[in-house]
Amino acid sequence: MNKDQVKGKIKEVAGEVQEHTGKLVGNAEQQAKGHAREFQGKAQKAAGDARESAEDMQKDLDKDRDPLGR
């Protein structure tokens, strides 16, 4: 797990809380800001997932190139 995955998930959850709080108090602006924050978090987490996947593939390639399989 990398920092983008963690920060993205935190931002996603915070956005959900902000969105639901805005809905509860009837504040459409806070609801919209929360919704936007949630999707920013999802995008950041997806970027972290992609980076981790690329790093894993690179490790596999490096392992395949090592004649001793280290």
Image: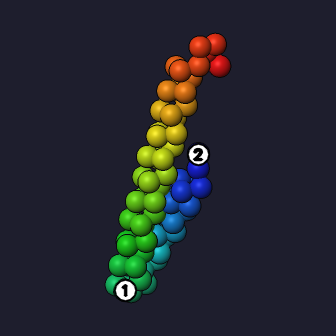
Q: Residue furthest top?
A: 68
Q: CA distance from mark 2 to mark 1?
A: 33 Å
Instruction: Work out whether residue 40 or residue 28 is closer to the camera in this orientation and state it.
Output: 40
Name the quarter where the N terminus is drawn.
top right
Q: Nearer the viewer, mark 2 or mark 1?
A: 2
- The residue at the point 47 percent across, 75 percent down is 18
- The residue at the point 47 percent across, 32 percent down is 57
User: What x and y, as percent, mark residue 20?
Assistant: 43, 72
Does residue 8 appear to the left or right of 24 in the view shown? right
- The residue at the point 34 percent across, 84 percent down is 28
Task: Describe the element under mark 2 as helix, strand or loop.
Answer: loop
- The amino acid type found where label 1 is placed reads Glu
Name the quarter where the C terminus is drawn.
top right
The image's mark for residue 1 is 2
Which residue is disc 1 drawn over? Answer: 29
Question: Does residue 32 sit above or below 14 in this rendering?
Answer: below
- The amino acid type found where label 2 is placed reads Met
